[in-house]
Image (tube, rainbow, N blue to C red):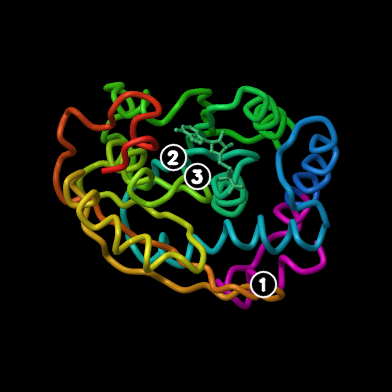
Amino acid sequence: MQHLPRITHELLNLKLSPAQIEAFQIYAEELMVWNERINLTAITEPEAIEVRHFADSLSCLLVMRSRMTGRRVVDVGTGAGFPGLPLKIACPGIDLTLVEATGKKVLFLQHMVEVLNLEGVTLINERAEVLGQMSEHREAYDWVLARAVAPMPTLAEYLLPLCKVGGHCLAQKGESAHQEVTGAQEAIRLLGGRLVQLTPVELPTVAETRYLVDIEKVAATPPRYPRRPGIPAKRPL
Ligand code: SAH
């Protein structure tokens, strides 16, 4: 971990402990080993893993820590654990649920939870559309996170049903963020959301600006949303 401690310090004023740096080291090694067997990520260089996976995931804290809401966090379409698992390593107090539709990726997540000895992490091998209609998950989370899962109107239908009224959804987006949000305004409103702001994030060695899209849940989501699996992507609101 040659870069991550410096980046988190400069970007977030966050000082990682030796144990946390060790956890990130193990995470990077396991990711590289497992990636040879199952397709987890296109980013395989150690330095790129530190910046584009770990630091990028931790950048969510720029928005999350400025709001004193609860600690139930869900990461939807987490893949190899991003952004949820780095956040759990940096902030062990959060109660984290990782949702992922692909079973093989969940096996990797299970392995990481065991290797890193993490407590307070729940893994769910299910689609977001199914979870959003289950009473124990619907409107149950203070923070609903996603990175690189779907275009904004589809993503809003995955995320907002899971969020408590008064909680927040946080979508990590690239250069298209403003355009995507403009196109999703009606979907966000319909699902009970209100756009708070877009926070730009500059990561060292990454040319593009990244954006954190913060959406507050201000009203209950109508019961018919999310629609059946596949429909939010096929017929976005
Ligand atoms: N968030 C991770 C992975 C992005 S790839 C990262 O940024 O690295 C998108 C992931 O979302 C894939 O693993 C895919 O299986 C999952 N996914 C896509 N649609 C989903 C849905 N409706 N419900 C749950 N998982 C979904």
Secondary structure of the residue carrying numbered label 2: strand
Magenta residue check for 21: yes
Specify which label sits upstream in the sequence, 3 or 1: 3
User: Where residue 171 sits: x, y (%)?
Assistant: 42, 54
The numbered mark at residue 74 is 2
Q: Is mark 3 within 8 Å of ligand 1?
A: yes
Q: What amino acid is labelled 1 in the image?
A: Val
Q: What amino acid is labelled 3 in the image?
A: Val
Specify which label sits upstream in the sequence, 2 or 3: 2
Give the magenta range: 1-22
User: Where residue 134 sits: x, y (%)?
Assistant: 31, 21
Count the numbered circles shown: 3
Q: Residues within 10 Å of mark 3 (few under 14, many from 20)?
A: some
User: Where residue 10 sits: x, y (%)?
Assistant: 62, 78
Mark 2 or mark 3, whichever is nearer to me? 3
Q: Which residue is mark 3?
A: 149
Q: Which residue is mark 1?
A: 206
How far, Cα to Cα, is label 2 from label 3? 14 Å
How far, Cα to Cα, is label 3 from label 1? 20 Å
